[in-house]
Image (cartoon, rainbow, N blue to C red):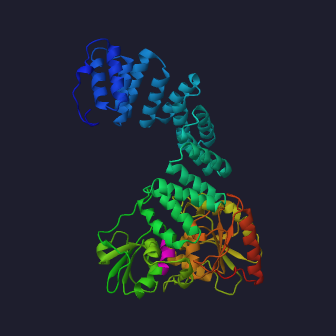
Amino acid sequence: MPPLGRPCHLAAMDSTDGPLDLIAERAEAAWSRGDRHRAMTLARLGLGQDDGHPRLLAVLGAFEQAEGRSAAAAGLFRRAMARCGDDPLMLHNLGVALRGAGLIDAAAAAWEGVLRGCPQRFATLFNLARLRDDQGRGEEALALYRRACLADPAASDAAYNLGNLLARRGALAQAAEVLGKAASVTPHDARIQTNLGIVLRRLGDAAGALACQRRAVALDPDLADAQWNLANLLLALDDYDEGFARYEWRKRRAPWRLVDPPLAEWRGEDLAGRRLLVGLEQGAGDMIQAARFLPVLAGRGARVIVEAPDALAGLLATVDGVESVVAPGAWAAARATCHIRAFSLPYRLGLRFADLAATAGPYLRVPPRTPTPPALPPGGQGPCVGLCWSGNPDFTENAVRAAPLAAFAPLTAVEGLTFFSLQKGPAVAELAASGLPVIDLDPWLVDYAATAAAMARLDMVVTTDTSVAHLAGALGRPCLLLLAAHCDWRWGIGRETSPWYPSLRLLRQERLGDWRAPVARAAALLAGLRRGTDTRGPEST
């Protein structure tokens, strides 16, 4: 059999002599054994004798769909159905083609038509479930996935998707049960193992999660998501040796969009006299957190150039040992001899958990001549508190990390304090609608240096997991960090203080999505601020 995708001649056994149904059988047999082009050739020859033959149109439609020509495939399936009626397989395939052509409602209607006559048809249940899942119609998707699992209990893909949807909706115990069953049916699927590990971690079973992640990596060492998930868990457990080594896999995951400069990557060798470009990471918080390592590089003899967007440039230029800051992609201006991504520094520097105290700072400063927002009063006029409730809306995890501003209402009820908004981005719009007594600083916060200048006048910052928390910590400013019940690795598991940022106090949700407990604790601590009580936690260990 010739390789797939290449033209081929018909073998004698594939003669087009004889009844068209026999030709259709031969075309279908060629398709079944993976010889798509032979199947297509047979179908076209047969259609030359009868251009409406349903089985031949179905084979040609399947070929067009496989080649990515979904609209053409849909037309062929419709022609076939004009003669054979609403055959379930034909109608199902029409739905596949319609979805491929972007006709979502028509695809759903086709699949719903199949299920009216064949309510337990697995492939149709699964496809319609995925469509509803992608549309965000979670209740419908859940019901369809469950029906698919009942229709074919051995089909782990349906259980995998059902478990993932349950996890996204916060039904973690159910998700663990479903994914656990899927793992027992398909024990060698690394995707199931790594997602089960994520769910177990969120349920507080770190040991079970670690076992799943190690099993996933053993099953498929090249699965970047599994390596990444294992790295995050190890780092949350304070295993920085292995954790940061595996953290390098972040650059192989689909969300990674940064392009490396045409320079040798620094891998820990002698830096004396070398110009090292420290490259951008995808999050501003990552860049702020990693900036603590820049003086270490300078101490090893490197001339340190940092790649950063305008919003961070002025701030990062204040770090000891930084020679210059260049714009993203301005590699020629850096005149560097080697490069490294900012959050690859912990790995290449051999960072261990016990080393954090030496890097904790403060290591950022407000750049000279940075104006302070005029709305902020001078010192000595009563405690001032900055609020931030949402991070980058384009970041997937922000939906879990962010709080609605309304959840902060108990904070602003604390008497004797003046509240200021440090919020940027679309979430600023919540302020006007909230009616809360919070002064908006958004017009003055043109970059992180301006936000740092504002923080210098504040007695406390209260924020969810955003770059504002990293900025407060790097400046050494007091900060109450409100965390989701399952949070990023850098905040550890269960602790109330941060070895990365000693000026932060960590206040965690008791249940995912419920901000009442951390906000109540923050309000009590702010009342202590008004009375002059120390609101900081114990020293990090």
Q: Does residue 135 appear left or right of residue 274 in this picture?
A: right
Q: Does residue 387 appear left or right of residue 40 in this picture?
A: right
Write down the quadrant of residue 511 in the picture.
bottom right
Residue 13 visible, this orientation: yes
Q: Does residue 60 appear left or right of residue 7 in this picture?
A: right
x, y percentage for residue 429?
A: 60, 61
Q: Which residues are magenta?
A: 286-292
x, y percentage for residue 536?
A: 69, 80
Q: Quadrant of the C terminus?
A: bottom right
Residue 395 visible, this orientation: no
Query: Compared to 193, does 510 lie above or below?
Result: below
Q: Is residue 309 magenta?
A: no
Residue drawn at x 56%, y 26% as measured from the top left: 115
The front one of 86 and 198 is: 198
Q: Residue furthest left?
A: 9
Magenta residues: mostly which secondary structure?
Answer: helix
Write down the quadrant of residue 332 in the picture.
bottom left
Residue drawn at x 47%, y 75% as measured from the top left: 346
Query: How many numbered marks, from 0 up?
Result: 0
The front one of 55 and 34 is: 34
The front one of 369 and 323 is: 323
x, y percentage for residue 44?
A: 28, 22
Q: Does residue 487 appear left or right of residue 8 in this picture?
A: right
Q: Quadrant of the N terminus?
A: top left
Residue drawn at x 49%, y 84% as measured from the top left: 367
